[in-house]
Image (tube, rainbow, N blue to C red):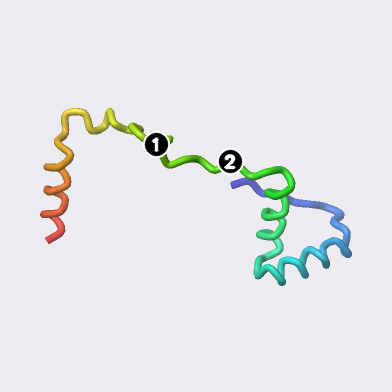
Amino acid sequence: MATLNIKNFPEGLYGRLRSLADQEHRSVAQQVIHLLSQAVGADEPRSLLELKGLGKECWRGIDADRHVEEERSAWD
């Protein structure tokens, strides 16, 4: 995760930011991330359906039912 440092941040603006963060039960850093996400747009939510078939090559030649049963029997 990246680090963002801001120099010469206006005291009045920081005070308002701190107050808003307190009201929202967030740290100042969390509040800045929240506000920036709203301002520049967060990543579009992805659909779980996009994962369909992902990694299927890893299971080629393996009986999934047998594998699950072997794993379950190892729990005892």
Q: Indicate the amino acid at tag 2.
A: Glu
- Work out which quarter of the rendered image holds the C terminus and state it: bottom left
Disc 2 to disc 1, C-alpha distance: 16 Å
Q: Which mark is residue 36?
A: none
Q: Secondary structure at mark 1?
A: helix
Report which residue position mark 1 lands on. Answer: 51
Q: Position of residue 18 (x, y in %)?
A: 76, 67
Q: Position of residue 64 (x, y in %)?
A: 18, 39
Q: Indicate the amino acid at tag 1.
A: Leu
Q: Is residue 12 left or right of residue 47?
A: right
Q: Earlier in the sequence, mark 2 or mark 1?
A: 2
- Proximity of marks 2 and 1: CB atoms separated by less than 8 Å: no
Position of 23 relative to 67 (above/below): below
Mark 2, Cα crowd under 10 Å, few <14 / some 14-19 / many 20+, is few
The residue that appears at 15% across and 54% down in the rendered structure is 72
The residue that appears at 15% across and 58% down in the rendered structure is 75
Position of 61 relative to 27 (above/below): above
Report which residue position mark 2 lands on. Answer: 44
Total number of numbered discs in the rendering: 2
The residue that appears at 68% across and 43% down in the rendered structure is 41
Q: Position of residue 23 (x, y in %)?
A: 71, 71
Instruction: Write down the quadrant of residue 58 in the picture.
Output: top left
The residue that appears at 67% across and 55% down in the rendered structure is 34
Q: Is residue 74 left or right of residue 3?
A: left
Q: Position of residue 11 (x, y in %)?
A: 87, 63
Q: Nearer the viewer, residue 45 or 17?
A: 45
